[in-house]
Image (cartoon, grey):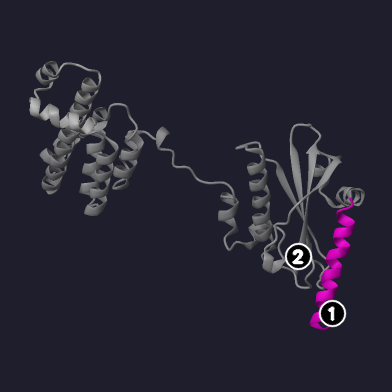
């Protein structure tokens, strides 16, 4: 058969299939026959509608067409989508389960965007309509069959994930994790109200990381993160412990400590200046402000210039 004849036949497949399967009565009968009976039992097929839009990539539209149905469930609360992929090519698609998964995710994303929800997602039930030359359908219909190691995919099916929850992990357990304890301990306690109360724990993690020969750049990154995330005075107890007990880090941490001191001074000066500006705006007498802030009249005049 010539390429033109094949293309014409594909077009006719598409037209015929869509003509039948977008007719709601025919679609309802088709789904009653071919959809899994346990799914049909949950659906109110009297509410079946055809959704607009297609999820097929542009370069594959000559080989596939699709129809999306929406149906209410019998509980009258939730709905489901039925995704019908109609295959027009003579050769079956080897990675069809992966393709179907992408289309299911696209349907879910559209539903989320339209309904502004973050849970209670509808089911998306896929069906592939096939009339290729090979019989029966020669390729996988289960995505797990595409993976080299089925045991791993069975243990961690697509859509599930392992969880490292630092919020429920004990400090003792974290300290058993060697060099990783530094990362985990810092992240676990970064939001604590009074960081000084966890200085000992952070120091213990630093010592373990040093003992286990952590790369210097990783230690520096952890300290830089702490300096950005917490106030200078909160880090003083931690830095003092490191300076006192870990000679190899002493010089660097003293440098960090000096940076914190300078930062604290700058912040203190900025706070004082802001306070003086507010007093000036409120009309407080210059003599009172000068006495309270230990500023000279000349310094007050300079600040006043910034207010204009």
Name the image quarter holding the N terminus.
bottom right
Report, in whole angstroms, how far the alpha carbon at label 2 lies from the one at label 1. Answer: 17 Å
Most frequent secondary structure within the magenta stretch: helix
Q: Which residue is drawn at 63% across and 62% down?
A: 146
Question: Could you say which quadrant of the image residue 79 lies in?
Answer: top right
Residue 279 lies in quadrant: top left
Residue 181 percent coordinates (x, y): 31, 43
Identify the residue position indicated by label 2 in the image: 64
Residue 70, which numbered label? none
Q: Is residue 114 left or right of residue 161?
A: right
Decide if residue 215 is in sight here: no
Query: Is residue 272 shown above or below 97?
Result: above
Position of 244 with respect to 44 (left or right) is left
Question: Is 101 situated above or below 132?
Answer: above
Helix, strand or loop at mark 1: helix
Q: Quick one: label 2 or label 1, which is nearer the N terminus? A: 1
Residue 130 seen from this side: yes
The x, y position of residue 119, in whole percent, is 62, 37
| Image point (21%, 53%), residue name | 216
Question: Which mark identifies residue 5?
Answer: 1
| Closer to the camera in the image, 263 or 120 | 263
Residue 308 screen position, x and y as percent:
24, 31
**Number of marks in the rendered image:** 2
Q: Where is residue 182 in the image (x, y as percent from the top left)?
A: 29, 43
- Queried whether the magenta region covers residue 175, the answer comes back as no
Q: Is residue 17 magenta?
A: yes
What is the magenta range?
1-23
Tell me if 220 is positioned left or right of 30 in this view.
left
Decide which of 28, 14 is in the foreground and name it: 14
Badge 1 density bin: few <14, some 14–19, many ≥20, Cα 10 Å = few
Q: Is mark 2 on a helix, strand or loop?
A: strand
């Amino acid at each position: 058969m010539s390429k033109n004849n094949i293309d014409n036949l594909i077009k006719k497949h598409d037209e015929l299939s869509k003509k039948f399967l977008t007719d709601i009565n025919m679609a309802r009968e088709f789904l009653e026959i071919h959809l899994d009976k346990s799914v049909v039992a949950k659906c109110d097929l009297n509410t079946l509608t055809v959704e607009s839009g297609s999820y097929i990539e542009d370069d594959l539209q000559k080989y596939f067409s699709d129809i999306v149905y929406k149906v209410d469930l019998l509980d009258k609360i939730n709905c489901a989508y039925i995704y019908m992929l109609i295959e027009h090519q003579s050769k079956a698609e080897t990675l069809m389960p992966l393709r179907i998964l992408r289309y299911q995710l696209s349907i879910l994303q559209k539903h989320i965007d339209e309904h502004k929800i973050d849970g209670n997602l509808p089911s998306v039930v896929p069906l592939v309509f096939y009339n290729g030359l090979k019989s029966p359908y020669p390729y996988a219909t289960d995505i797990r069959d595409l993976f080299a190691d089925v045991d791993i995919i069975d243990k961690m099916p697509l859509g599930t994930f392992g969880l490292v929850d630092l919020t429920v992990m004990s400090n003792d357990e974290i300290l058993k994790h060697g060099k990783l304890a530094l990362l985990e301990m810092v992240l676990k306690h970064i939001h604590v109200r009074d960081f000084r109360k966890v200085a000992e724990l952070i120091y213990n993690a630093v010592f373990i990381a040093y003992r286990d020969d952590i790369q210097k750049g990783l230690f520096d990154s952890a300290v830089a993160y702490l300096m950005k995330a917490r106030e200078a005075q909160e880090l003083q107890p931690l830095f003092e412990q490191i300076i006192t007990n870990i000679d190899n880090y002493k010089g660097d941490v003293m440098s960090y400590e000096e940076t914190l001191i300078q930062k604290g001074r700058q912040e203190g000066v900025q706070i004082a200046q802001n306070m003086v500006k507010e007093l000036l705006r409120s009309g407080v007498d210059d003599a009172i402000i000068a006495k309270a802030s230990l500023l000279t009249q000349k310094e007050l005049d300079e600040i006043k210039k910034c207010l204009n």
